Amino acid sequence: MFFAAAIVFCSCFGVKAQAPVVAATAKPAAAAPAAKSALGIIDSFFKKYKEDGTGPAIDFLFGTNKYFSNAPGIATLKVKLDSLRQTAGTYLGKELIAQRSASPSLYFYSVLVKNEILPIRFTFMFYKPQNEWVLYRFKYDDQMDAELEEAGKINNKHP
């Protein structure tokens, strides 16, 4: 089974990635106008992902939060996601799996990314410290099948 996962989250000290660090760009590009809602940011991200590729989409997403400063970590994320994207096949669209809020200022979204060969799950967490939504956490993986299989077991045991 294919596997790739990356977690990136914001802290005052920059970006931390689960994956090893690779080459970087110094500053994320804020190429698209700021989206007003968290879902608007996600829609803009996927539009860029489809039309412009992984790099510009990640730059847009991380550009929503000025505190993401670990350019090597973001570059690693781009390389790993781009590699998984090539394995997964052509991007076909997205479907919302789950949306949760911890408060009016903290939202979580899980999105199924449909590809020709295999699905990828993207999870986004957005935080609204004042007036604008910013990316707080981003993760992707291709392990939904294992979770679904586990959820289908009687008493979580093998049949």
Image (cartoon, grey):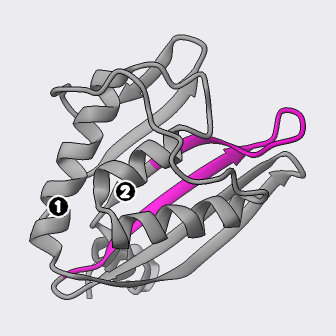
Residue 97 lies in the magenta-colored region? no
Q: Which of the pair 147/138 is nearer the observer?
A: 138
Q: Which of the pair 60/2 is nearer the observer?
A: 60
Q: Residues within 10 Å of mark 1 (few under 14, many from 20)?
A: many
Check residue 84 in the rendering and tell me which mark sits there, or answer none: 1
Q: x, y (%) of residue 32?
A: 56, 53
Going by the image, does 55 lie left or right of 105?
left
**Residue at position x 24%, y 53% in the image:** 81
Q: Residues within 10 Å of mark 2 (few under 14, many from 20)?
A: many
**Residue at position x 17%, y 61% in the image:** 84
Residues shaded magenta? 118-138
Q: x, y (%) of residue 44?
A: 56, 64
Q: Is residue 83 above or below residue 127?
A: below
Q: Secondary structure at mark 1?
A: helix
Q: Earlier in the sequence, mark 1 or mark 2?
A: 1
Check residue 66 in the rendering and tell me which mark sits there, or answer none: none
Quarter assignment of residue 142: bottom left
